[in-house]
Image (cartoon, grey):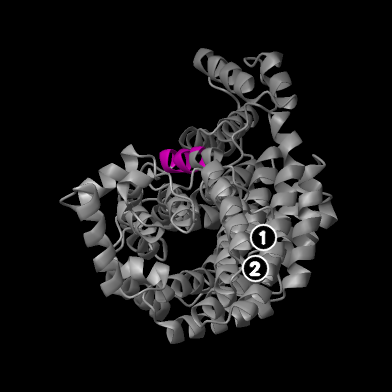
Amino acid sequence: MACRNVTQVNVPEGARAAYARGKWKEAFDAFIAADAASPLEPDDLDRLAAAAFLIGEDALSLQYRTRAHAAFLDHHDSLGAARSAIWIAFLMMDTPKQRAQASGWLARAQRLLEDADAPCVEHGWVQCATARQRAGSGDMAGAQAAFAEAAAVGQRFGDRDLLTLARHGLGRTLVMMNQTDAGLALLDEAMVAVASGEIAPIVAGAVYCSVITACHDIFDVRRAQEWTDALQGWCESQPDLVPFRGYCLVRRSELLQLHGAWEHAMSEARRACDRLADPSSRPEAGAAFYQLADLHRLRGEFAKADEAYRSASQAGRKPQPGLALLRLNQGQLDAADTSIRLALQEVRDTHGRVVVLSAAVEIMLAKADVAAARAASDELSQFAQTLGLPYPNALSCSARGAVALAEGEPLRALESLHAACAGWQELDAPYPHAQTRMMIGLAYRQLGDLEGAELEFDAAHEAFERLGAAPAATRVAALTRRSPIAPATGLTGREVEVLRLVATGITNHAIATRLHISERTVDRHVSNIFTKLDLSSRAAATAYAYQHKLL
């Protein structure tokens, strides 16, 4: 191979120094200025491409990588050209519309390495990219072999970036092949290298985002949070860095939501939607809009939730079970029931099925189909036992407790609900923890302990209010014995409960299910409310409830 020309007189040393210090925006601006004065040499085009990527300018990064590739070819540097081609392939392979191009660039890199005919670390990078392609096509055995070969090359040449990326890829592959313990051990090892700053930022960001996605897929939220916390200092030391994009932003939003930081979660979800402005071109867009919709639903912003679920659907992400839960919140029980039963028929992957089963229990109990809810709960328990992780276990305990309540067995319900409560508390998950406490209150009420029930309802209500979970706060408020309506109105305690639920927009059938009374009784209560308050419609009743601060 010909010797490389490394003379680069047109680039100020300040640009390279800024790059070496991790001042990515400063380096980007300096390289751009130098390039405007005189075209950069290939090595500096490579640095400019990396800086562009690290500050979130993906399209510019691709443009400069392509220029670097051409410049390396002009300098008769086959290895440099192959490296650029490999990075171009990495940039393109996650975008459906560019996967054929990614394959072409990878083939070109392979040909350039064959022409160079010399042992080099670039062979390992090609194997790493090839392994990602095989994993994407479902060839797990092929991906495992290619990642292992890439790791061996990285080890042989002492390339920490390649070694970390390849071992992480091997870990992801093993997790997908249900060799979870071995896979997670490799992912943890890769994250040690990331957190300690041993590898380049581009590789570090890719590994972190991939690891928390793997944790998401198997519900290992504690591991995802631990590595997120460990990486916080590294991110803060590089304020120009945009390390999180695509699915990574969505997964971070989900973690923030779980831990009760809903405003921050909303910000991350919106940022993900903004970065993925063209939903048809990026599969992550569907996940981003779905996460945004879930947050709107939990906050009671139903029109915004509906719109975001539709955007998720247009981007190719089925909007279930969120849309079914939205219909439940809106009192459209038949629509919710139909949607969730169809989702149960369609969803087969472990993560998706667990989430759908949990929603199915809630919706089927609202429809008073206890047998179907019990079947969904039993299947959920099987998944929880297989996964052996705190999150699915807490989810399963909550579902079992809800079913036991519906079956009129409060003592059995309490056993499951207390276990769920402990699980949610351990995971620092305030919303499901408050939901569970509300069910514990219902169990106490069935057992005649009205004071104990009231304490649980109050704790749940306070948590929901703190989170901004308006629909849940309204539901639990309707269960309390206290009423802010003046006695002069003449409403009974039960009528106050019914009025609160009417104000949430749900049907009489749904109110009957919530309060465990007949629909005919609800009809009578509604009629009495209208008469006593001189109201003529449900809309007027809703307005009255808001005016008198019932919600």
Three-letter code, disc 1: Trp
Q: Up-down: is 44 above or below 163?
A: above
Say whether residue 260 is left or right of residue 321. Answer: right
Q: Secondary structure at mark 1?
A: helix
Dominant SS of magenta comes to helix
Disc with the residue nearer the chain's start (1 vs 2) = 2
Residue 122: image location, x then y, percent = 69, 51
Determine the image quadrant of residue 27: top right
Say whether residue 544 is left or right of residue 292. Answer: left
| Residue 130 is at least partly visible in this image | no
Work out how far the residue at label 1 is from the one at label 2, CA to CA, in angstroms.
6 Å
- Circle 2 Cα neighbour tier, 10 Å, few/some/many (<14 / 14–19 / ≥20): many
Q: Say which quadrant the C terminus sits in.
A: top left
Task: Tell which of 438 and 495 is nearer to you.
Answer: 495
Q: Residue 528's mark?
A: none
Residue drawn 41% across and 73% down? 516
Determine the image quadrant of residue 47: top right
Residue 537: image location, x then y, percent = 17, 52
Does the magenta portion include 172? no
Residue 237: image location, x then y, percent = 73, 28
Task: Tell which of 101 and 299 is nearer to you.
Answer: 299
| Residue 403 is at least partly visible in this image | yes
Q: Up-down: is 291 above or below 437?
A: above
Q: Residue 424's mark?
A: 1
Residue 18: image location, x then y, percent = 70, 20
Do residues under tags 1 and 2 come within 8 Å of each other at their CB atoms?
yes
Q: Which residues are magenta?
A: 267-275
Write down the residue under mark 2.
394
Residue drawn 62% across and 67% down? 449
Three-letter code, disc 2: Ala
Say whether residue 461 is left or right of residue 362. Answer: right
Residue drawn 58% across and 57% down? 454
